[in-house]
Image (tube, rainbow, N blue to C red):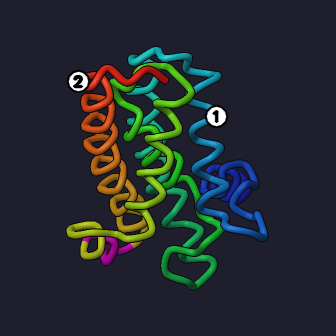
Amino acid sequence: MRILYYSIATGFGVGYSPLAPGTAGTIMGVLIAYFLFGGNLLFLFLAISILFIIGIAAGSFVEREQKSKDPSIVVVDEIVGMWISLLFVPHFWWSFLIAFALFRLFDVLKPFPANSIQKLKGGLGIMMDDVVAGVYALIGTHLILGMLNYFQVRL
């Protein structure tokens, strides 16, 4: 069971990246969404729901074992947060790039309530601050895409 928890929590090892494991996890999330889900909203919703629940358990296990609050090797939260930021986003590389940039920005800055919600214990705290960052990125992405559409900017 330990291997399964670590595999899920670390994004099948991506969280062990020596440089910016959170960014590496986010890149994994965006690539999975782009190439595997292919714009299928149902798959995306299901994946978010399932991985969120499993991520809480895996994150709690790894946090307990590492004796560290939100260890940097845990990137399942970045994957779920990135997927949230892609809800209803058109399946174009530049749309995904906008969502990626905004998610990383909000994940790093942790604006309220993300900065408070991460204080929750265990895997729930690990997951929820990235859920909030994903929602902020989702809103920002749709605002930017709406403005580009309004001003008839073609990418």
The answer to whether 121 is drawn above or below residue 145 in the figure is: below
The answer to whether 20 is drawn above or below residue 97 in the figure is: below
Q: Nearer the viewer, residue 63 or 131?
A: 131
Q: Which of 52 and 138 is in front in this view?
A: 138
- Which residue has dot 1 on it? 31
Three-letter residue code for mark 2: Tyr
* Label tally: 2
Q: Distance between the residues labelled 2 and 1?
A: 28 Å
- Which residue has dot 2 on it? 150
Residue 144 shown left or right of residue 70 in the figure: left
Image: magenta residue range: 117-121
Residue 64 shown left or right of residue 112 in the figure: right
Report the predominant secondary structure element of the magenta stretch. Answer: loop
Instruction: Locate the N terminus by quadrant.
Output: bottom right
Tell me what residue is drawn at x 27 percent, y 69 percent.
111
The answer to which quarter of the image holds residue 9 is bottom right
- Which label is found at residue 76? none
Secondary structure type for disc 1: helix
Callout 2 crowding tier (Cα within 10 Å): few <14, some 14–19, many ≥20: few
Tell me what residue is drawn at x 73 percent, y 54 percent.
14
The answer to which quarter of the image holds residue 6 is bottom right
Three-letter residue code for mark 1: Leu
